[in-house]
Image (cartoon, grey):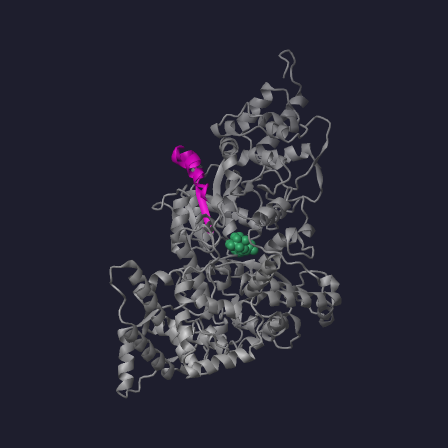
C-alpha cells in the first residue's frame, strides 16, 4: 500500500506507468489498472497481475465471476509469485489462452511445452498474459465477429484456412445458443465444431465421449497444438486433474458419461467462474438404444439440460451439441428425446456420410475349419504380403487422372491397390515383423478388426419343435471344437517358427471398463510411445491401437463369421504375422463406424468385409424386451443383406441404410469395378418350387379354426410342417431333381422369389419369422403374381425368371453342401423310411459318413456308463 506521507518519486511514477501500459497491452482495462496501481503500491508487473487477478477489484460483472488465479494456484499448490520458485509438474498444457485480438497472424500451430517441469511464476504470468482477461461473451458479439475469431483460431491452432460449411452451420447454432445435432461422416471434422467455441470465448467446453482411448488421443492432439485439455473418468489416475478442470484450468474437458452426473455441482460452479461455452456429446449414437453402441450411462445426460437450461436464464443457458457419424432417423429422434432437448428448435446439421476414399468390398468365405484358413484368407494374406509391380491405379482413379481399370474381382485387388508406398492403407504396426515380410522389405502391415456375428449355434431356439430347421444349422456348423483344436495346433506349430510374432487375442467388445481401468494419468504424461502397441492386442495396446493405429492409418477389415470362429481366425492371422483383433458388432452402423476409421487422412483405403453367408446369424440371448429384440434382428438382417447383395454399389447400399440417397455410385467398390455376377436363367427352378409349394398347400388344407385348443395346436403344427419352406426344399433335393443346388442355395433363391413378389411369408408364420432374420423364409405362400407366372408358363409363354445370384447362392455353388440333411419332422422322417428310394439313399449316406459322433451323444453315453458303473 502506498504510504500517505510518502510522495511518489518520478522514477516510481515512470515504473508504474510502464506497468500500466504493459497491463493495458495484455488486455486489462486502462482505468481499472490505474486505479489498482494507485491504491496499491505496486510497480512490479507480476505482483500487479496477481493482485488484479485476485478478483477483488474486478469491476465488470463478468470479471467478478472469474476465479482469482491465486485461488486456482492454491487448488493445485502452485507457489504464488514472489515466494521461493519451485518446480511443479508441468501438465504440458498451457493455461487457457483464448484469442487475443489484434494478434499478428501466425500460421504455424502453437508448439507444445517441451519441458516436463516449469515454474509456477511463469505459468501464472503466461496465464495472465494470454488468459481470462480476453474471455468474451458470445452474446456480446455478432455472428460475423464470432466467425472472424473462429477462423483466426482455426489458422492459429490448426493451420487450417476456412471452416467447412457444416462446421459454420454448427458454429452458428452455437452462436445462437441453439442446441444442435451434427451428423457428418467419420473424419469430416466434427471435433472442430466443439473445439472452436472454447477457443473463441475462452470458456470451457465439456465433451462427453465414450472411450477413454479416444479422449486420450484427442487430448494429446490438442495439447500438441497448444490447447489445454484433459480427460476425466475412471481411467484418470491423476486425481488432481479433476480439481484443476473444475477450477477452469483446461479449455476442453473430456468426460466419461459415467462420471458426468457426479460432476454436476462442480460444473455449475465452473459455469459461474470461468464459464462453460458448450456441452458436446461426441459419438451421440451411444445415447440411443436403437443405435449400435448403446451405453446406458449416456441416458443420464438428460440432467445437463435440466441443470444448464430449463431453469436458468437464457444468458446462462449452455447449449448442447450432439455429434455422430452414424445415426438413422430413429436414432436421431431418440438422441434428441434422451438429451431432453427440444426437437422443434434443435438445429440438425447434416452432411453426406459418404466417404469417397473408402473402397468397400465383400468376400465370401466359409472358413469352418482352420485347415482351410490359408486358402480362405489368401486374398487377405496376399494383399499384405505379396509384392506387386502394378501401378497405383486406384489412386490415379481417385485423383481423376485415369479411368478406373480395376477389374476381375477380389483376386487382383490386393495387387492393384497396395503397390504404391504413398498409400496409407497399411503400415508396419509392430517392430516385430515376421521374417518373410522382412525379406519382402516393403513398408506394409495391417490392422484387422474382426467383426463377429453369432450364428444359430448360439441362439436359443424357441420354435425348434415346430420346424426343426435349427438342427440342420447346427449339424452343418457345429464343428467348432474341431476348429478350435486345429487352430491351436496350427498356432503351436507356427509359433515355433516365429516366436516373436506371437500375438494374443482378446475381444474388443465391452472393453470400455477394463480400458478405463488400464489407461490413466494426465494425457500429456503418456507419451506417444506408450500408446504404441506392445505386441498384444488386449490391454493398453488394444485401446491405443483402436485410437491411434486403426483410426488414423490402418485399413479396417472386418469379418462376420460366428463369434467363436472370429477368435480362431484372429489367432490364425496373428500367427501369420498380421495384426488382428476380433471385434464383435452386429449392425451396419457398427461396421460403417469402424470402417470409417480407415483413410482418415483422405487417402484411398480398403474396407473388406469377410463373411460366411451360409451361416444365418442370430442374436445371443440377452435381456431385451420385445421391441428391442425386433430392432436387433432388423439391424442384423440389414447387415446380412448387405453382405448378400451383389447388384448395388456398396456405398449406395450403406448410405441408404442411414436414409441418405447417394445419387451416384462410388466407382471403386467391388460392385462398381467388377459389376454384378452373370445373370442366371432360373426359370426351371422357380417353376418347380412354386408348383411344389402350391401342391403342399393344397394337401394340407387351411389352418384349423376348431375350438379345442389341443386339436388346433396339432393341426397348426402339421400345417406349418407341411408348408415349411425347408420341407419343400427337402423334397426337391431328396428327389435329386436339381442335384447341384444345396440347401443354402435354395434358401437364397426363396429370398429372391420373395423380392420378385412371387412368394411371401404366410401370415400364420409371421410370428415365427420375427424370431429370425428376414431372409430365413419359413412358411411361404405363393402370391397372385407367382401364380400368374406359373399360368403364363403353362400356357406356353416365354416368360422367364432370370436373376443375379446373391452372395450365399454364389458361395453355395462354389462349394455346395451336397451332403444334404433333411429337416423334416420326426413323423415325416419316420415315414421316409417306408419309401425304398429314400431308405436306400439314407442308408447309403450313413455308410459313407465319417462324421464324429456329436458331443451331446458322447456325453450321454459317458453319463449312462457312469450310471451303470454305479449300479
Ligand atoms: N475446415 C477444415 N478444413 C480442412 N481440414 C479439416 C477441417 N476441419 C477438420 N479438418 C481435418 O479433418 C480431420 C478429421 O477431423 P476430426 O478428427 O475432427 O474428424 P471427426 O469427424 O471428429 O472424426 P470421427 O468421426 O472419427 O470422430 C483432421 O485431420 C482435421 O484437421
At horizontal 49% and vertical 50% (from top left) the residue drawn is: 283
Quarter of the rendering occupied by the C terminus: bottom right
* Residue 294 painted magenta: no
| Residue 455 seen in this snapshot | no
At horizontal 71% and vertical 63% (from top left) the residue drawn is: 501
Return the residue found at the far top: 5
Vertical comparison of 117 with 473: above or below: above
Quarter of the rendering occupied by the N terminus: top right
What is the total number of numbered labels drawn onto the structure image? 0
Would you identify the image quadrant in which residue 461 lies? bottom left
Would you identify the image quadrant in which residue 115 lies? top right
Q: Residue 588 in the image: state x and y as whole percent.
A: 47, 61
Would you identify the image quadrant in which residue 50 lies? top right
Q: Residue 462 in the image: state x and y as whole percent.
A: 42, 59
Question: Of residues 280 and 475, which is closer to you in this image?
Answer: 475
Question: Of residues 202 and 339, which is closer to you in this image?
Answer: 339
Question: Of residues 800 and 327, which is closer to you in this image?
Answer: 800
* Residue 311 painted magenta: yes
Residue range corresponding to the magenta coloring: 299-323
| Residue 349 seen in this snapshot | yes
Q: Residue 858 in the image: state x and y as whole percent.
A: 58, 65
Vertical comparison of 868 with 286: above or below: below
At horizontal 47% and vertical 52% (from top left) the residue drawn is: 622
Q: Residue 325 in the image: state x and y as whole percent.
A: 47, 55
Return the residue found at the far bottom: 796
Vertical comparison of 645 with 538: above or below: below
Please indicate whether residue 99 sits to the left or right of residue 334 in the image. right
Amino acid at each position: 500500500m502506498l504510504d500517505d506521507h510518502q510522495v511518489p518519486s518520478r522514477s516510481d511514477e515512470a515504473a508504474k506507468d510502464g506497468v500500466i501500459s504493459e497491463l493495458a497491452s495484455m488486455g486489462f482495462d486502462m482505468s481499472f489498472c490505474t486505479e489498482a496501481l494507485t491504491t496499491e503500491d505496486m510497480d512490479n508487473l507480476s505482483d500487479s497481475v496477481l493482485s488484479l487477478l485476485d478478483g477483488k477489484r474486478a469491476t465488470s460483472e463478468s470479471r467478478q465471476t472469474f476465479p482469482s488465479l491465486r485461488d486456482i494456484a492454491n487448488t493445485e499448490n502452485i507457489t504464488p509469485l514472489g515466494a521461493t520458485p519451485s518446480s511443479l509438474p508441468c501438465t504440458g498444457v498451457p493455461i487457457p489462452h483464448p484469442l487475443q485480438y489484434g494478434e499478428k497472424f501466425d500460421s504455424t500451430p502453437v508448439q507444445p511445452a517441451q519441458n516436463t517441469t516449469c515454474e509456477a511464476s511463469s505459468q501464472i504470468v503466461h496465464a495472465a498474459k494470454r488468459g481470462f482477461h480476453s474471455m468474451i461473451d458470445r452474446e456480446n458479439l455478432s455472428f460475423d465477429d464470432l466467425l472472424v475469431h473462429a477462423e483466426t483460431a482455426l489458422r492459429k491452432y490448426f493451420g487450417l484456412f476456412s471452416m467447412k460449411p457444416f462446421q459454420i452451420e454448427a458454429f452458428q447454432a452455437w452462436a445462437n445458443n441453439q442446441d444442435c445435432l451434427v451428423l457428418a461422416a467419420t473424419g469430416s471434422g466434427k471435433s472442430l465444431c466443439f473445439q472452436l467455441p472454447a477457443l473463441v470465448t475462452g470458456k470451457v467446453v465439456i465433451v462427453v465421449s465414450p472411450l477413454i482411448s479416444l479422449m486420450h488421443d484427442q487430448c494429446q492432439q490438442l495439447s500438441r497444438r497448444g490447447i489445454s485439455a484433459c480427460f476425466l473418468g475412471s481411467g484418470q489416475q491423476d486425481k488432481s486433474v479433476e480439481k484443476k478442470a473444475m477450477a477452469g484450468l483446461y479449455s476442453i474437458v473430456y468426460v466419461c458419461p459415467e462420471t458426468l452426473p457426479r460432476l454436476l455441482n462442480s460444473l455449475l460452479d465452473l459455469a459461474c467462474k470461468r464459464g462453460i461455452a458448450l456441452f458436446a456429446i461426441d459419438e451421440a449414437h451411444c445415447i440411443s438404444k436403437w443405435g449400435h453402441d448403446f451405453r446406458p450411462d449416456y441416458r443420464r445426460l438428460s440432467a445437463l439440460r435440466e441443470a444448464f437450461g430449463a431453469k436458468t436464464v437464457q444468458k446462462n443457458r449452455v447449449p448442447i451439441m450432439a455429434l455422430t457419424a452414424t445415426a438413422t432417423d430413429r436414432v436421431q429422434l431418440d438422441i434428441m428425446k434422451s438429451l431432453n432437448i427440444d426437437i422443434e428448435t434443435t438445429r440438425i446439421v447434416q452432411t453426406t456420410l459418404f466417404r469417397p476414399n473408402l473402397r468397400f468390398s465383400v468376400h465370401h468365405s466359409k472358413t469352418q475349419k482352420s485347415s482351410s484358413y490359408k486358402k480362405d484368407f489368401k486374398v487377405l494374406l496376399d494383399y499384405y504380403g505379396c509384392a506387386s509391380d502394378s501401378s497405383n491405379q486406384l489412386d490415379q482413379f481417385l485423383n481423376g487422372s485415369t479411368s478406373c481399370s480395376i477389374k476381375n474381382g477380389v483376386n487382383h485387388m490386393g495387387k492393384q491397390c497396395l503397390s504404391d508406398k504413398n498409400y496409407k492403407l497399411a503400415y508396419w504396426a509392430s517392430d516385430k515383423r515376421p521374417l518373410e515380410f522382412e525379406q519382402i522389405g516393403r513398408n506394409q502391415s495391417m490392422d484387422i478388426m474382426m467383426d463377429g456375428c453369432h450364428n444359430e449355434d448360439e441362439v436359443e431356439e424357441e420354435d425348434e419343435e415346430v420346424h426343426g430347421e435349427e438342427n440342420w444349422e447346427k449339424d452343418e456348423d457345429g464343428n467348432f471344437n474341431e476348429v478350435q483344436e486345429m487352430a491351436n495346433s496350427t498356432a503351436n506349430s507356427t509359433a515355433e517358427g516365429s516366436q516373436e510374432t506371437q500375438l494374443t487375442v482378446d475381444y474388443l467388445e465391452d472393453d470400455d471398463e477394463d480400458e478405463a481401468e488400464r489407461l490413466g494419468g494426465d494425457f500429456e504424461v503418456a507419451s506417444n510411445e506408450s500408446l504404441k502397441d506392445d505386441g498384444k492386442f488386449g490391454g493398453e495396446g488394444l485401446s491405443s491401437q483402436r485410437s491411434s493405429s486403426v483410426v488414423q492409418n490402418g485399413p479396417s477389415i472386418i469379418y462376420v463369421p460366428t463369434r467363436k470362429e472370429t477368435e480362431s481366425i484372429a489367432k490364425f492371422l496373428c500367427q501369420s504375422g498380421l495384426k488382428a483383433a476380433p471385434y464383435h458388432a452386429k449392425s451396419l452402423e457398427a461396421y460403417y463406424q469402424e470402417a470409417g476409421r480407415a483413410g482418415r487422412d483422405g487417402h484411398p483405403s480398403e474396407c473388406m468385409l469377410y463373411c460366411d453367408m451360409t451361416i444365418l446369424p442370430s442374436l445371443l440371448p440377452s435381456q431385451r424386451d420385445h421391441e428391442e429384440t425386433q430392432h436387433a434382428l432388423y439391424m442384423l438382417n440389414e447387415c446380412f443383406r448387405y453382405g448378400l447383395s451383389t447388384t448395388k454399389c456398396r456405398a449406395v447400399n450403406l448410405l441408404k441404410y442411414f436414409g441418405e440417397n447417394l445419387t451416384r455410385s462410388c466407382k471403386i467398390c467391388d460392385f462398381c469395378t467388377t459389376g454384378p455376377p452373370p445373370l442366371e436363367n432360373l426359370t426351371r427352378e422357380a417353376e418347380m418350387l412354386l408348383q411344389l409349394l402350391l401342391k403342399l398347400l393344397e394337401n394340407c388344407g387351411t389352418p384349423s379354426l376348431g375350438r379345442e385348443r389341443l386339436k388346433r395346436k396339432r393341426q397348426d403344427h402339421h400345417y406349418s410342417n407341411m408348408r415349411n419352406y425347408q420341407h419343400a426344399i427337402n423334397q426337391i433335393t431328396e428327389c435329386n431333381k436339381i442335384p447341384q443346388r444345396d440347401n443354402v442355395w435354395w434358401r437364397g433363391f426363396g429370398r429372391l422369389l420373395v423380392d420378385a413378389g412371387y412368394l411371401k411369408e404366410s401370415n400364420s408364420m409371421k410370428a415365427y419369422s420375427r424370431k429370425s432374420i428376414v431372409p430365413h423364409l419359413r412358411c411361404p405362400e405363393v402370391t397372385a403374381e407367382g401364380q400368374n407366372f406359373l399360368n403364363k408358363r403353362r400356357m406356353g409363354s416365354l416368360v422367364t425368371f432370370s436373376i443375379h445370384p446373391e452372395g450365399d447362392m454364389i458361395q453355395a455353388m462354389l462349394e455346395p453342401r451336397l451332403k444334404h440333411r433333411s429337416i423334416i419332422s420326426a413323423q415325416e422322417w419316420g415315414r421316409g423310411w417306408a419309401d425304398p428310394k429314400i431308405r436306400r439313399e439314407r442308408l447309403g449316406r450313413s455308410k459313407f459318413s465319417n462324421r464324429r459322433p456329436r458331443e451331446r451323444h458322447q456325453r450321454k453315453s459317458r453319463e449312462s456308463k457312469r450310471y451303470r458303473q454305479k449300479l
